[in-house]
Image (cartoon, rainbow, N blue to C red):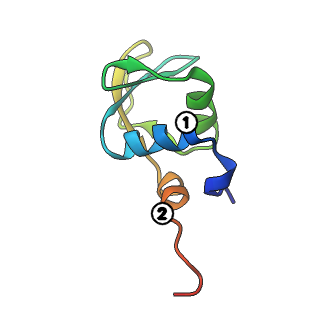
Amino acid sequence: MMERNDLSCRELATLRAVEAGRAELLVSCVPNLRIDGGWCDHVAVLHLIAEDLIVPARQVAVGWLVRACITEKGRNVLHPVSDAA
């Protein structure tokens, strides 16, 4: 199971921005992500997508920008539930 310490600080910041609704995903064979209008670290984005932590909000044609969404797995990485509760 993926944990917070499996991600870099940059990947965690990107994941938080997606959760806050500030990100758009460029749907492509090599996807990319914009946060607040600026393009993100491409390697970090590819890792977050490959780990199924972020996904497009809906299916769109290749080359389109669409809102990026955090997955349940991504939420669990950002907000782990303590077993001691």
**Position of 17 relative to 83 (above/below):** above
Residue drawn at x 55%, y 36% is 10
- Residue identifier under label 1: 10
**Dot 1: what SS?**
helix
**Dot 2: what SS?**
loop
On the rendered structure, is 47 left or right of 79?
right
- Between residues 39 and 66, which one lies in front from this camera angle? 39
**Position of 61 relative to 83 (above/below):** above
Quarter in which the N terminus is drawn: bottom right
Residue drawn at x 52%, y 73% is 81
**Position of 76 relative to 59 (above/below):** below
Q: Which disc is residue 79 wearing?
A: 2
Going by the picture, which residue comes out furthest to the bottom? 85
Mark 2 or 1, nearer chain start:
1
Going by the picture, which residue comes out furthest to the top? 63
On the rendered structure, is 30 left or right of 54?
right
Residue drawn at x 55%, y 57% is 77
When asked about the image quadrant of residue 22, the answer is top left
The amino acid beneath tag 1 is Arg
The location of residue 26, given as percent across then percent down, is 43, 20
Going by the picture, which residue comes out furthest to the front? 9
The amino acid beneath tag 2 is His
Question: Are the residues tagged 2 and 1 within 8 Å (C-beta)?
Answer: no
**Position of 31 relative to 77 (above/below):** above
Residue drawn at x 63%, y 34% is 47
Crowdedness near tag 2: few (<14), some (14–19) or many (≥20) residues, C-alpha within 10 Å: few
The location of residue 17, given as percent across then percent down, is 38, 40
- Between residues 62 and 32, which one lies in front from this camera angle? 32
- Between residues 36 and 27, which one lies in front from this camera angle? 36
Between the residue at mark 2 and the residue at mark 1, the CA separation in whole angstroms equals 17 Å
Q: Which disc is residue 74 wearing?
A: none
Q: Nearer the viewer, mark 2 or mark 1?
A: 1
